[in-house]
Amino acid sequence: LVKDHQRRPSRWPKMSPLSLSDAQSLTEKHHRIIHAVVFEPETSYLGLQVILDVQACRNLVVHRVLESQSDVVKHFGASSFPSLLLFGHGHPHFLSATNATRAGYTSSLFQLCGHRPAALLKPKASPESLTRVRRPLQPRMTPAVHMQDLVSTVVYIIRREVPLHSILHGGQLYTLSKFLEAMHQCLPMPSHVANHINYLLRQLKIYSGHGVRMDTWRRIVGKRSEFSWIPEHIEWKACQGSLPAHRGYTCGLWTLFHTMAAHCLLATEGGAMAAGLHRYTGDTHRAFDTANLFAIGRRRPGSMDSRAVLLSIRSFVHHFFSCADCRTHFLAASSNLSVQVRDSRGAVMWLWNMHNKVNHRVAKDDSSDPLFPKVQFPPASLCIDCRITSDPREDPSLISWDTNQVFAFLLQFYGPSGVLSMEDNNEHHTYLTMESHPQPHPLASAVFFMSFSSVGLLAIYYWFKATYPYSASRIARLFIHPKKQHMI
């Protein structure tokens, strides 16, 4: 939306960096409203966030200047990044450096424009909505892998993350192709979603020479057939947060990564893994079913192993994960991935270890859902044998793991026997299958069957009558006048 002028709403604020001519005009004119200029590093999103936060203030306009704009920075005399310069409220002055945060800038600007931060940042809650916030949809639901969450994550990637690019070419196109291929080989999905991903792969090969523009991508994604399509809407199951801003896609993405790694390992080394996992038992999970190891479908010799999947995940995060802070941390931690991970088991365990590090880092972050606190996974309630020592504060430095038990648990939890299919939840199954293919009403089906059967019986009767006229009349009288059988 920052770059695409045609898709902007009519009241969309100006979010591009301030030019030198606009900066000179800003300092020369007398202003009836307040103007604020956020100076920030090239990779920062602070200015964009503040602009959107205070958009409701009609007597306030926020601009942004990047550190690389040396001429504009020199014109204003800015020397630190981030910093905030105010116009139109007394003499121009910089805000105190102690408030150089999104919350600090937003709070100060709200006070200047006459609004309370809480009134704008949080919607006014009715008693019903307060009850809903205090009691989320599934506050104590046992962690599980739901097919619904996997499908919604795939939809989010294809319909929301990829279209953030204006065109796919070069490394982006190659990365997307490899990631879709990994999903097609290693992710359990409904057949219509799997078929559509395969269709997208074929289309990307056609456009590989000259790139794919977003209007072409949306047209390809939107093409539907009876056996190949993806939903248009997103609905979370186990990844549902207490508020729309919590969990959702990030939870689904981690679930998708773990599931891909586990399924690819079992697809390439399923028999050997099953032989070594028979010792694992758990009250909260079904028995490890070796017969289902190869029941995922679309498997063939030479499929991706988990290590190759992990490398495709890293490339995907690099090119397509829109959370800049999350992307930076993930890429830094996986910079030496080819050396850190030597085999498929190492890929599964690396993702588990990385996810726990992220959970610890963001446990007290504002973006975390307070009703779903971040813990070290798996908790003792799911796998008591996985932890040698534990800690009530979930400090990873005080928790020691039995890695063999953890590995067995991960394959059990994210493997074929751990994924809850769409049929395990009739409501969600109906959502997917009936979205654009309405099922016939049972009464209509019964009428159709009876009509078809009647036509068939009449055809047989007239054929029999033409061939054996006397016998046919006897049979007809038998059904029409059953009480006069003695007269025949």
Image (cartoon, rainbow, N blue to C red):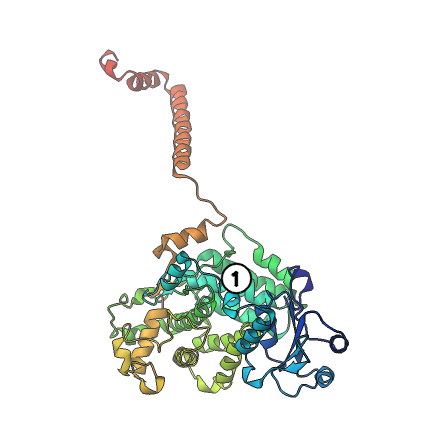
The residue shown at (24%, 15%) is: 483
Front residue of this view, candidates 333 and 460: 333
Q: In which quarter of the image is residue 83?
A: bottom right
Report how many numbered discs are placed on residues in the image.
1
Is 300 placed left or right of 395 in the picture? right
**At which x and y percent is residue 390?**
28, 82
Front residue of this view, candidates 218 and 62: 62
Is 177 placed left or right of 74 in the picture? left
- Viewer can see residue 45: no
Name the secondary structure under disc 1.
Answer: helix
**At which x and y percent is residue 246?**
45, 68
Front residue of this view, candidates 214 and 90: 90
The residue shown at (57%, 62%) is: 202
**At which x and y percent is residue 472?**
34, 19
Q: Quadrant of residue 9?
A: bottom right
**At which x and y percent is residue 282?**
25, 70
Residue sitting at the far left: 486
Q: Quadrant of residue 178?
A: bottom right
Query: Quick one: label 1, few (<14), some, or many (20+) residues within 10 Å?
Result: some
Q: In which quarter of the image is the C terminus?
A: top left
- Name the residue type under label 1: Asn
Mark 1 lies on residue: 198
